[in-house]
Amino acid sequence: MTESFTELIPGLPDDLALECLTRLHFSTHRVAARVSRRWRRLFQSRDFYYHRKLTGHTRKVACLVQLLPAQAEAQAQSGPDRPKPTSPPAYGVSIFDPVSGLWSRVDPVPKYPDGLPLFCQVASSEGKLVVMGGWDPTSYDPVRDVFVYDFTTLTWWQGRDMPEARSFFAAGEISGRVFVAGGHDESKNALSSAWAYDVAADEWAPLPRMSQERDECEGLVVRSEFWVVSGYRTETQGGFEASAEQYDADAGEWRRVEDAWGASRCPRSNVGVGKDGRLFCWADSDLAVRVGSCGIKLGGRTYVSGSGCQGGSQEFFMVEGQSGKLRRIEVPDEFVGFVQSGCCVEV
């Protein structure tokens, strides 16, 4: 009998065996996929991922672009009266599981073994992590690289390059497509253009332009719509606007939203959605995170980090509900570095 006709688990009907495999923790998938070719195909299939998601056996984790330990230690030792580190900062991807409280770190991207592209943007898609753009950590030149991390195989693969180099852009994911919009080009010109990346097909497609240029904007998904919050035009460098853009993926249209954000405030990694559906700034939620704050919604709870002052130590919290009280969490020493940005990945 060939493998294609063998049982998933000997002695069990396939439907019952599927339910057993569905309950395996995502961290075991790499080893489990080695059992047989049929198991490997199952664990790597989109259908299996969505079956786990529909039956409530996936888990929302925070994927953080975080300063690596040696860099974090050098930064902490510099202090306000000591010289700052002269080497360029090096960032990696840290994983925080709010259910178990465990922290881990993803292996480096093979093309950038010493640290991710600076100011790269991250998004999730069907249980995978997508890293896009940023600056080459050695030359500081903008890059169009796209890398996808597969949590089943624990490996990176390189996707199709972004159609145009852009930095400090907004990103968000809906139904397997990662949307990017705004930011600035290689000449520091703010952009109004937008694209959608189909991760499974490894293809980019253009979207309609936004109503205006938006550099250093923030992206998030609200009720299955992609929002691009604030940003500024080329001629108003640093003058963050109160408006936002809302993209309806079904209609393929942008809608401008006035007074969605506090003007003159940078929204990067800092936008939350309150109980009333209005946007708010996580830096305003507590004095402990008023500088360099980062908020990542993980289902019914939110990861929040930041510092109480410029150059201060990082503080880490969980927030239950949409705008509840911050609860401090314990973090291992090797994961206390500055968090530049992040996203939720359901694995």
Image: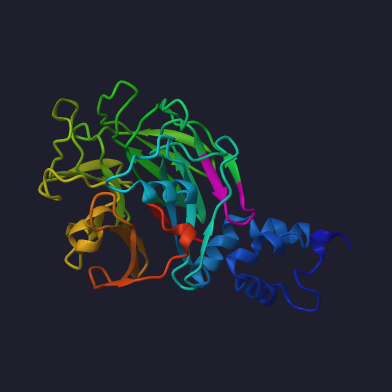
For image coordinates 71% across by 60% down, the residue present is 33
Q: Is residue 197 left or right of residue 112?
A: left
Of the pair 260 and 211, the residue shown nearer to us? 260
| Image coordinates for residue 95, horizontal then vertical, percent | 49, 58
Count numbered badges in the picture: 0
For image coordinates 38% across by 47% down, the residue present is 75
| Image coordinates for residue 318, horizontal then vertical, percent | 34, 69
| Image coordinates for residue 51, horizontal then vertical, percent | 55, 66
Magenta-highlighted residues = 147-155
* Colour theme: rainbow
Q: Is residue 273 left or right of residue 45?
A: left
Q: Is residue 342 above or below residue 57?
A: above
Q: Residue furthest right?
A: 1
Q: Work out which quarter of the rendered image holds the N terminus and state it.
A: bottom right
Q: Is residue 199 above or below residue 32?
A: above
| Image coordinates for residue 38, horizontal then vertical, percent | 75, 59
Q: Is residue 49 above or below residue 178?
A: below
Q: Quadrant of residue 217?
A: top left
